[in-house]
Amino acid sequence: MEKDSNRKIIHIDMDAFYASVEERDNPLLKGKPLIISGPPNSRSVVCTCSYEARKFGIHSAMPASHAYKKCPQGIFIPPNMKKYKEASNKIRSIFLDYTDLIEPLSLDEAYLDVTQNKMNNPSATLIANEIRQRVKNELNLTCSAGVSYNKFIAKIASDYNKPDGITVVTPDQGANFVANLAVSKFFGIGKKTQEHMNTLNIKTGSDLKVFEMHRMIKLFGKRGPYFYYAARGIDNRPVTPNRERKSFGREITLTEDLLDTDQIISLISDLSERVSTLLAGENKKGRTITLKIKYHDFINVTRSQSFPQPINDTEIINKTAVNLLKKTNAGKKAIRLVGVSISGFPEEDKNWGQPELPLE
Ligand code: TTP
Ligand code: MG
C-alpha cells in the first residue's frame, strides 16, 4: 500500500461538549464542576462533565452516584439533547462552507477532507483555525482540531492540545509521530490487546513497527494489516459522509466491570438516545436494532431484532435494546462494554466497499 500523504484531513472535536453548551447558556455555571447526568441518587450515568469536574476524577460513563461521592459540590444537570443537536447542526453548517466531505462520528466530532475545498484554500491548518474561530464567534463554544494527512493521525492529534487547541502533523512528521505514540492510542487497541502487546514488549508505535506483515498477521490475526500500516503512519480510509454508512452505533466501554442490570439499562437508554439523534441528523430510519455486550472475560455477544418498517424513534430503539438485553447473560455475568446500533437502511448502497478499521 502506498503512503497516501497527499490528502488534507481535519478532525474536529468539541470540548466538553454537552457541559460547554450548558455553561454557555447559563454563565452562572462557568468554572463550576458541572456534571451532565441524571440525579446523583439515581441509576444514571455521566454523559460528560466540565474540565473543572474532571479535576475530581469524574468522567463519561461513570455512575452519577460515584461522581457525587467524588465531588458532592458538583452541579448535576440532565442532558438536553435538543440543544446539543441544534449546536451540532450549526457546527455542521460551518463545515459545509469548506467541504461536503464530512464524516460525523458523533454530535460533537467529525472528519473533514479539505484536500479540495470550497474556499480553494491550500492550507488545511488555516481552514482548521478559521473553523475554530467561527465556532467560537458564532456558537460561543470551543473545539479542538487535529490536522494531518489521514484520519488515524488527525483524530489523535485533535486530542493533543485539548481544550481549545490545534495540532498539526505533516506527512514528514507522521512516521515519527506514530513511532512515539503509546499503542493504547491506536484505534481498536483495548485492554486485552494492550496486555497481549505488553507481553511482547510492544509499548509504542516504534516497538510495533519492527514486525513484518506476516508476523503481524500471525500475532494479531485479521487486525495485523491495520497495525502494520498504522505503525508506519499509513491509513488510507477515505472520509465517508454518513449517507454511505451501513449502520449507526454507539458503545460505551466501562472503566469498571458492571453487574447491575439497572445501571446497564440506564447506559442503554443513553446510547439509544444518541443513536436516535444520529439518525435524526441524517434523516434516516433503520430496520434492525442490535445490542452488543462484551463480558468481563472479553467474550462478545450481539443480539438483534428487525422490524418490518424502518424506525428511528428513541423509545422504540431503547425498548428493543432493553428487551435484547434479556437474551444475554448481562446481570449474571459482569460486562465491560455495551453498544446499541441500528442498520438496515432502505436506501442502503450494497456496493459500499471501504471497511472501517477492525474494532476489538
Ligand atoms: P466526547 O467528545 O468524548 O467528550 P466531550 O466533548 O464532553 O469532552 P472532550 O473535551 O474530552 O472532547 O463526547 C462528546 C459528547 O458525547 C459528550 O459531551 C457527551 C456525549 N457522551 C455521552 O453521552 N456518553 C459518553 O459515554 C461519552 C464518551 C460521550
Ligand atoms: Mg468532545
Image (cartoon, helix red, strand yellow):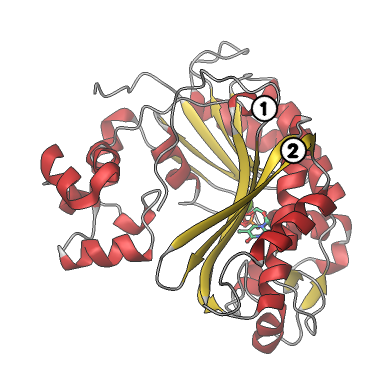
The amino acid type, in three-letter code, at marker 1 is: Phe
SS at badge 1: helix
Q: Is residue 27 left or right of residue 253?
A: right
Location of residue 215 with respect to 203 vertically, above or below? above
Residue at 70% from the left image edge and 71% from the top image edge: 45
Q: Can you give x and y, in whole percent of width and height, for residue 339 in the image?
A: 59, 56
Task: State the residue position of label 1.
Answer: 95
Q: Is residue 167 visible?
A: yes
Q: Depth check: 71 or 184 in front?
A: 184
C-alpha span from label 1 to label 2: 19 Å
Kind of residue indicated by mark 2 = Leu
Residue denoted by label 2: 279
Residue for point 87% across, 55% down? 25
Residue 234 in the image: state x and y as whole percent.
29, 32
In the visual, does 84 lie left or right of 114? right
First-in-chain label (1 vs 2): 1
- Residue 258: % across, % down: 56, 77
Position of residue 178 in the picture relative to residue 264 (left or right): left
Element type at marker 2?
Answer: helix
Residue 177 position (above or below residue 333):
above
